[in-house]
Image: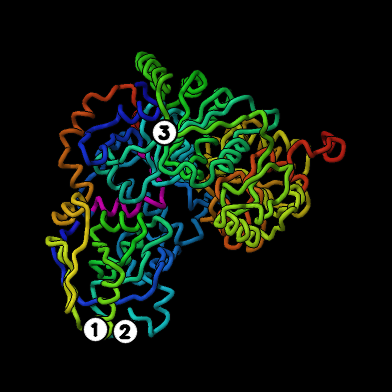
Amino acid sequence: MEAFTTHTGRAVPLRRSNVDTDQIIPAHWLKKVTRDGFEDGLFEAWRKDENFILNRPERQGATVLVAGPDFGTGSSREHAVWALQNYGFKAVISSRFADIFRGNSLKNGLLTVVLEQKIVEALQELTENDPQAEITVDLQTREVRAEGVTASFELDENSRWRLLNGLDDISITLQNEADIATYEAKRPSHKPQTLKV
Amino acid sequence: MGRTLAEKVWDDHVVRHAEGEPDLLFIDLHLLHEVTSPQAFDGLRKSERRVRRLDLTIATEDHNTPTLDIDKPIADPVSRAQLETLRRNCAEFGVRLHPLGDVEQGVVHVVGPQLGLTQPGTTVVCGDSHTSTHGAFGALAFGIGTSQVEHVLATQTLPMARPKTMAITVEGELPEGVTAKDLILAIIAKIGTGGGQGYILEYRGPAIEKLSMEARMTICNMSIEAGARAGMIAPDDTTFAYLKGRPHAPEGADWDAAVEYWKSLCTDEDAVFDAEVLINADELSPFVTWGTNPGQGAPLSSAVPDPASYEDPSERDAAEKALEYMGLAAGQPLRSIKVDTVFVGSCTNGRIEDLRAAAEVLKDRKISDGVRMLVVPGSARVGLQAVSEGLDLVFKEAGAEWRHAGCSMCLGMNSDQLAPGERSASTSNRNFEGRQGKGGRTHLVSPRVAAATAVLGHLASPADLSDAETRTPAGV
Ligand code: SF4
């Protein structure tokens, strides 16, 4: 996983609430066998409308999604997080995220930032009026900064530490490799083995 | 203080415990299938990691496999790609795979137990929510997501927060003709689809102790439909007898050591559960669902409920939506509901005992005109066993289609699907909107009810079949 310390980029303001995982990535994309290549499935239904904000030329290359409340509800598919990352998003800002989506995002290094609704709206207004306006998401100081906005956000210490160091769960577990080896060494011989017939 | 079964198995697998962190649990058995594993292997490849314990890992093909013409190339290109990816990944990483056509191929939750790999006191995971099935052996078995699949492949462990425990005690005895499926549907109707959330369920009591292993698997399989993390049943002589002599069961001194350990796996008298539910089996009768979640069920002898009778507004709303989707009216007797399709199979009811139960009802009978019945064994082995007992002939003579093993119409990822508006009686575990095909309507039932329904063309139990009317004389 890539470390996340601080990121500055242009934004896509998405003024919709309750954006569920089916809208983020429709079910028929789940038959894909990689973690890559989901960018075209991101918001697929909405993108058929050429006026949809993601399609606007001035939004190309944006990396921060500023979304309405209850972003990421619905199924547990990790594909929703992959689609946002494949498309190029590094951070999503909202006043409320669905639990499972938030868990999945932090596992994959997509920073989900919770800010008060009125601050989210201020960021949406700013970036609607000025597509070139940049937003900085600083995980070190736990702060979001943009023109006229400075807001701090919360994130539990464990998740923050993992993101700052780019540690995915596997890397963290492998730091305790010795514990696993010790456990394996004392495992009883009657335990099942798939390769022994 | 004493410990519950779940706590004992949990404690025996803690690799590392630290304040403020989830426990790191060792995983004894990791089952893989084609749908949730590709991105996990991809992740390993990218980070240049290998599978840590190939000897604790096994894969099979089930969700996408066709149940007809299995010797021909798979027609659907997307399904084919998923299966081919699994084959490539298993070859590259050295994982044991039972592909389509192999005698050990089948629904992953049928394959593990029948090989004797699922054993008491083990931790079992799979990228599939119905991994709870394996809890029937007194194993701690969890469904996991794709990132976790990769985590287990790389480390053979999983960081997990300890769930709470709930006892589901079933007093009394299941009446004649009432099965494990009826019991679990009644339990879910009672506690609700969210009733088990955050808990590991332990099914116990005299009615559970009498159940066969197959029936126990049916019960634990559907724990997830009550929202639970897992379901378990304490191992006993029934469990040991089932395991003895299976390909991967321990032998000799290992067997003795194992049985001694397994016997310690029961909830202590003074252990305390976080929640308890009591059910009386004596009062149960065949149970079916009328709605679009597994909690929306009722005794077959009753009627479609009136949404207005629900006090909780969200339940009322859910019932209204369900009736609309299902095309049913409040007050309609459940027995009057006509079906187009009957599906016997899945990891809930696709084992040999389930096929025997359905065949017993169908013997010397014909299924109703206009009803399509699919019988899909849970694994290739189950299929062979059924053939050796002549069950396939019973099904075929009754007019049913006898198929090859796989998930099939349980989720309709292959071509076994309901057409829009079609209605099925299905022995599977989910009646969600569109689960068996877009616009399809599903009633969850036991194998006995499925068979009787196929004969009469409407939801029915074997008690509704009159011998004189429907049994064709032998030889006709
Ligand atoms: S039979 Fe159905 S529930 Fe079981 S693993 Fe297959 S799709 Fe899932």
Q: Amino acid at mark 1?
A: Pro
Q: Which residue is mark 1?
A: A131
**Discs 3 and 2 carry the same chain letter:** no
Q: Amino acid at mark 3?
A: Asp
Earlier in the chain: of badge 1 and badge 2, it is: 2
Quarter holding the C terminus of chain B is: top right
Query: Residue A109 placed where, x, y %?
Result: 23, 59
- The label on residue A56 is 2
Residue A146 lies, with reference to residue B142, above or below; the image says below
Q: Are marks 1 and 2 in contact (CB under 8 Å)?
A: yes
Q: Which residue is mark 3?
A: B274
Gap in angstroms between the C-alphas marked 3 and 2: 54 Å
Label 2 residue near ligand 1, CB within 8 Å = no
Q: Chain of mark 2?
A: A
Gap in angstroms between the C-alphas marked 3 and 1: 53 Å
Span of residues in magenta: B30-45
Query: Residue A76 placed where, x, y %?
Result: 39, 55
- The label on residue B475 is none
**Secondary structure found at label 1:** loop
User: Which residue is drawn at the image coordinates 48% and 50% (left, top)?
Assistant: B63
Q: Amino acid at mark 2?
A: Arg
